[in-house]
Image (cartoon, helix red, strand yellow):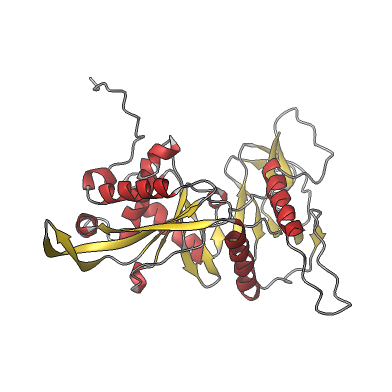
């Protein structure tokens, strides 16, 4: 038997609405089949089955408000008996909710605006809401405000910045557009920032989030296994991620906590900026535009294409030296096409031996 639950997105654990069921009890379900669709104030998310089997009982009716991490149904294997417990919540969800409660206790609640306005009740139990009662656009700014305030107040932010020479990166992107017209600088930067973290993460199947501006605010779709993707697959994955974010239809993969998130405002003419680390993450990479600027090379002033890059870090996890090391690796990788163009196969750690 396999639980099907509402993912805890990489932001504050706000409740979501279970808008529709895509499978019915007793249906034969394949692994990866969409079981249900839930809606937050900013997007819709398809919930997939992780295994093949038979659809169990729908534990909540469509239209219910459900806490992230809550099991909404089960996928039964032959011989499984239907469980009696209706409302369970995953350990990760319990942890996030506990952190939220601890944060709320640390800050005295504001006085009610009127004597008859009670404070909101904290609860994990489902509650039915009338169909169509939510207005995603109306609640977007409020949801963003809550998340940003929480992230900024709970995460001790600090930043390190460096001007990187990106002439090779820009030239390489231009060459590749002849065969991949949809390729952008962002695609190569996704690969670069992932590779810069391979050593510290100790693995190569790294996921990277991408900040995407939409009509419903900034969304953070996740691109899976970035260092292992070929450039063709990486471009396709980035295009798909942007499309689902702007359509407000996120995928189960977007519930993953990425190793880092990239935010690029260079196309809008921004030279340098900092950002707010997504709740649940420990860092964010922000980049400005690639532009010709004066640089000093061996005592002479020359013009080179550079890009200001800032690593925004959680000081509970990262120190300044860690950030400086990451920027140094970024500087090396962006100047070496052979590094950021590799991919499509796992990057195995070197053991000092040559393959024969």
Q: Residue furthest front?
A: 299
Q: Where in the figure is residue 287, as x and y percent of width and height? A: 36, 62
Give the quadrant of residue 67. bottom right
201 to 102, vertically: above or below: above
Looking at the picture, tell me which residue is in the foreground, 337 or 174: 337
* Left or right for 81, reference 92: right
Quarter of the image with the N terminus in it:
top right
Q: How many marks?
A: 0
Task: Tell which of 120 and 134 is nearer to you.
Answer: 120
Q: Quadrant of the C terminus?
A: top left
Seen from the viewer's position, the closer of residues 57 and 156 is 156
Give coordinates of residue 24: x percent, y percent. 72, 48
Q: Is residue 3 above or below residue 123?
A: above
| Whole-percent x, y for residue 158 in the image | 48, 57
Residue drawn 74% across the image and 72% down it: 133
The picture quadrant where one finds residue 128 is bottom right
Residue 42 visible (yes or no): no
Q: Is residue 337 left or right of residue 21?
A: left
**Residue found at the very far bottom of the displayed protein:** 114
């Amino acid at each position: 038997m396999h639980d099907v639950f509402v993912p805890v997105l990489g932001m504050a654990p706000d409740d979501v609405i279970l808008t529709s069921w895509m499978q019915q009890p007793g249906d034969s379900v394949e692994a990866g089949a969409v079981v249900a669709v839930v809606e937050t104030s900013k997007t819709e998310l398809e919930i997939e089955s992780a295994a093949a089997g038979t659809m169990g009982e729908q534990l909540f009716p469509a239209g219910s408000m459900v806490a992230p991490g809550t099991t909404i149904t089960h996928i039964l294997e032959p011989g499984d008996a239907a469980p009696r417990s209706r409302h369970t919540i995953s350990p990760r969800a319990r942890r996030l909710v506990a952190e939220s409660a601890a944060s709320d206790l640390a800050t005295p609640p504001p006085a009610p605006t009127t004597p008859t306005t009670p404070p909101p009740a904290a609860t994990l139990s489902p509650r039915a809401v009338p169909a169509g009662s939510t207005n995603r656009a109306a609640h977007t700014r409020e949801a963003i405000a809550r998340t940003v305030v929480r992230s900024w107040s709970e995460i001790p932010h600090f930043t390190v910045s460096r001007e990187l020479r990106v002439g090779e990166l820009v030239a390489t992107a231009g060459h590749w557009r002849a065969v991949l017209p949809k390729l952008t600088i962002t695609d190569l930067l996704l690969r670069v920032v992932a590779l810069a973290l391979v050593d510290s993460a100790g693995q190569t199947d790294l996921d990277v989030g991408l900040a995407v501006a939409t009509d419903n605010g900034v969304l953070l779709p996740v691109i899976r296994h970035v260092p292992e993707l070929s450039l063709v697959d990486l471009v396709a994955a980035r295009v798909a991620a942007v499309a689902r974010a702007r359509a407000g239809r996120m995928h189960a993969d977007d519930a993953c906590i990425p190793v880092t998130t990239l935010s690029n405002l260079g196309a809008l003419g921004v030279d340098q900026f900092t950002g707010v680390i997504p709740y649940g993450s420990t860092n964010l990479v922000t980049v400005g535009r690639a532009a010709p600027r004066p640089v000093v090379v061996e005592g002479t002033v020359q013009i080179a294409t550079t890009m200001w890059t800032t690593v925004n870090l959680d000081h509970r996890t990262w120190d300044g030296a860690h950030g400086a090391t990451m920027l140094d690796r970024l500087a090396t990788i962006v100047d070496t096409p052979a590094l950021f163009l590799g991919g499509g196969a796992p990057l195995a750690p070197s053991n000092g031996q040559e393959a024969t």
